[in-house]
């Protein structure tokens, strides 16, 4: 292995900066591609670390929460994230589920994303009936507001009324196409 002098290191740094300046767009595309390619792997490592060090992570999350409570609440309200009335551990678990599901409705055939409509984290086993399962991420799934309300309506609980009252009504491309097809059939 060759050892570089300080002068050679400085020349290499300058060459690197010039190359990056010339090929900035291409380099940014490569960085973005690598980021997307490795997203799931990073998430798995993060989850494995959390599972191995739950007690330590919980303490750190509480400490972070206490130091940044106002910023986090404001950000949560602006982004339509988890309610501040939920425990910190539950909010972090729900946000990890959003990451896992790419903030996309997992209802068969839906696939709406948070950019188009509200995406809720649904507890497959209701928190009111199974409080011991509320933090287990494998028992949570992302649904758009419409499908979340449909699920609770089919189940027969009152929660669907709350969801329907709060949800944002956004027409997506698929609904718009259906409207135009229906208009075409009438003529």
Image (cartoon, rainbow, N blue to C red):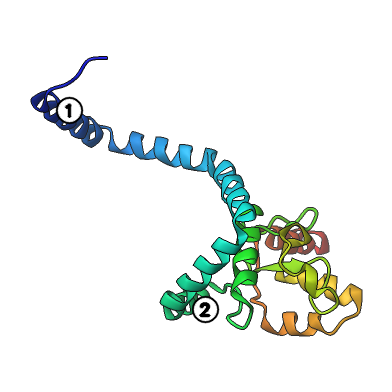
Asked whether 165 or 71 is in front, the reply is 71
Residue occupying the far left of the picture = 7
Q: Quadrant of residue 8?
A: top left
In the rendered image, the vertical position of residue 55 relative to residue 153, given as above or below? above
Mark number displayed over residue 134:
none
How far, Cα to Cα, is label 1 from label 2? 45 Å
Q: Quadrant of residue 16?
A: top left
Asked whether 178 or 135 is in front, the reply is 135
Q: Neighbour class for label 2 at 10 Å: few (<14), some, many (≥20)?
A: few
19 relative position to 134: left or right? left
Q: Secondary structure at mark 2?
A: helix
Asked whether 110 or 99 is in front, the reply is 99
**Where residue 99 appears, x then y in whole percent?**
60, 56
- The residue tagged 1 is 15
Q: Secondary structure at mark 1?
A: helix
67 relative position to 153: left or right? left
Which residue appears at 12% of the width and 27% of the height?
11
Mark number displayed over residue 77:
2
Pick the quarter of the image with the N terminus. Answer: top left
Q: Is residue 16 visible?
A: yes
Which residue appears at 16% of the width and 21% of the height?
4
Pick the quarter of the image with the C terminus. Answer: bottom right
**Where residue 53 appears, x then y in whole percent?**
59, 56
**Where residue 36 appears, x then y in whole percent?**
51, 42
């Amino acid at each position: 292995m060759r050892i570089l002098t300080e002068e050679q290191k400085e020349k290499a740094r300058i060459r690197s900066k010039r190359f990056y300046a010339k090929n900035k767009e291409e380099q940014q595309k490569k960085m973005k591609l690598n980021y997307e390619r490795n997203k799931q792997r990073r998430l798995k490592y993060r989850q494995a670390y959390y599972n191995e060090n739950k007690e330590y992570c919980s303490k750190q999350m509480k400490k972070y929460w206490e130091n940044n409570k106002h910023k986090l609440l404001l950000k949560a309200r602006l982004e339509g994230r988890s309610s501040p009335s939920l425990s910190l551990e539950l909010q972090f678990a729900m946000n990890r589920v959003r990451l896992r599901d790419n903030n996309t409705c997992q209802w068969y055939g839906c696939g709406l994303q948070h950019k188009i409509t509200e995406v809720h984290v649904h507890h497959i086993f209701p928190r009111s009936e199974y409080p011991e399962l509320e933090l287990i991420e494998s028992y949570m799934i992302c649904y758009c507001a419409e499908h979340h309300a449909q699920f609770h309506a089919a189940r027969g609980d009152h929660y669907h009324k709350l969801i329907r009252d709060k949800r944002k009504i956004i027409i997506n491309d698929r609904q718009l196409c259906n409207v135009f097809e229906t208009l075409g059939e009438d003529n």
